Image (cartoon, helix red, strand yellow):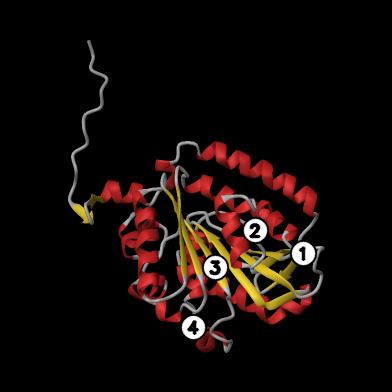
Amino acid sequence: MTDTLAAPRTKGPIVWMDMDQTELDNAYDQAVYASNQPLVQARRNAANARAKARLGAAERFQYGASEIEGIDIYRTRDIPDNAPINVYIHGGAWRNGRCADFAFLSEMIVDAGAHSVIVDFNNIDDVGGNLMTMAKQVRSAVAWVYNNAQKFGGDKNRLTVTGHSSGSHLTSTIVTCDWQKDFGLPKDIVKGAMLASGMYDLKPVRLSKRSKYVNFTDEIEEELSAIRHLDRLNCPIVVAYGTQETPEFQRQARDFAAAVKAAGKPITFIVGEGYNHFEIQETLASPYGLLGREVLKLMKLD
């Protein structure tokens, strides 16, 4: 009789903490820990189609010179002028996604009396693995929204940002941007941010298989690791993760939240019991959802 049981894997040399290379690679691959990803994706696609039908076409504005450097805006009908603004930075392992895929997150914002802005930016493969290019794009998009809020009836003094997954990493680079130095803007243009299921220290990410498509350098690791620049954090933030996410995404959230608290900055820490990486994003779409409720609190619309 043939033994069909797989032989136990031999652990390799330690690469990060107590993990060998395979374990670290898996810890930065959410699909390994979320077998229902295709089902969640199908739900999200259906929700996105329904939201687009209800919201109608988004208004498109360019924040940069290239075609991809644009934003989709869904305006609230409740407060046509001087409405609060929420900017969404999408995830996708830095490799996937377009703003048209995330209209399902706009409906809650619009119904609450705010304008929803979703940012398009290059994926990492489009820019030769240069993560700095992507960070500069999303920062430039937020600067454009702040400087041009009156064009779409927004209140630049009530601007918040939400990000999930690699979009949460990019959002962390937004809230730790030196706005005065880089854009000549006040240091507190962002009034609050939701950071869901992100990465805030790039050292272990650089050691993982993500380095095969991200061209990490010492400069990029340093500049784009938000945990190293908390002196630039000038707004309250929410840091969240799900208990069914990978061990590294859970640790990244815990360590970042602890560092922000130790720095004396205002923070709300949310642990989503029973949620995996993809499921917790869905809660951003509802005012009764775990994270949707927190976004509205940040915007003072709860």
Determine the CA span between mark 1 and mark 3: 20 Å
Residue 103 seen in the current view? yes
Depth check, mark 2 against mark 3: the one in front is 3
Amino acid under disc 1:
Arg
Q: Is residue 151 left or right of residue 143?
A: right
User: Who's the residue at 54% across and 54% down the image?
Assistant: 96
Determine the CA span between mark 2 and mark 3: 18 Å
Q: For mark 4, give the secondary structure.
A: loop
* Mark seen at residue 99: 2
User: Who's the residue at 64% across and 58% down the image?
Assistant: 99
Determine the CA span between mark 4 and mark 3: 16 Å
* Mark seen at residue 178: 4
Say whether disc 4 or disc 2 marks the residue closer to the N-terminus.
Answer: 2
**In this view of the protein, which residue sits in the foreground, 26 or 249?**
249
Amino acid under disc 3:
Ala
Determine the CA span between mark 2 and mark 1: 15 Å
The answer to whether residue 234 is above or below residue 4 is: below
* Mark seen at residue 75: 1
Depth check, mark 4 against mark 3: the one in front is 3
Counting other residues with Cα less than 10 Å from the Cα at mark 2, is it few (<14), some (14-19), or many (20 or more)?
some
User: Who's the residue at 47% across and 76% down the image?
Assistant: 176
Q: Position of residue 37 (x, y in %)?
A: 51, 40
Residue 122 seen in the current view? no
Amino acid under disc 4:
Asp
Depth check, mark 2 against mark 1: the one in front is 1
**In this view of the protein, which residue sits in the foreground, 259 or 98?**
259
Counting other residues with Cα less than 10 Å from the Cα at mark 4, is it few (<14), some (14-19), or many (20 or more)?
some
Depth check, mark 4 against mark 2: the one in front is 4
Q: Is residue 134 left or right of residue 16?
A: right
* Mark seen at residue 2: none
**In this view of the protein, which residue sits in the foreground, 2 or 272?**
272
Q: Position of residue 196 (x, y in %)?
A: 49, 58
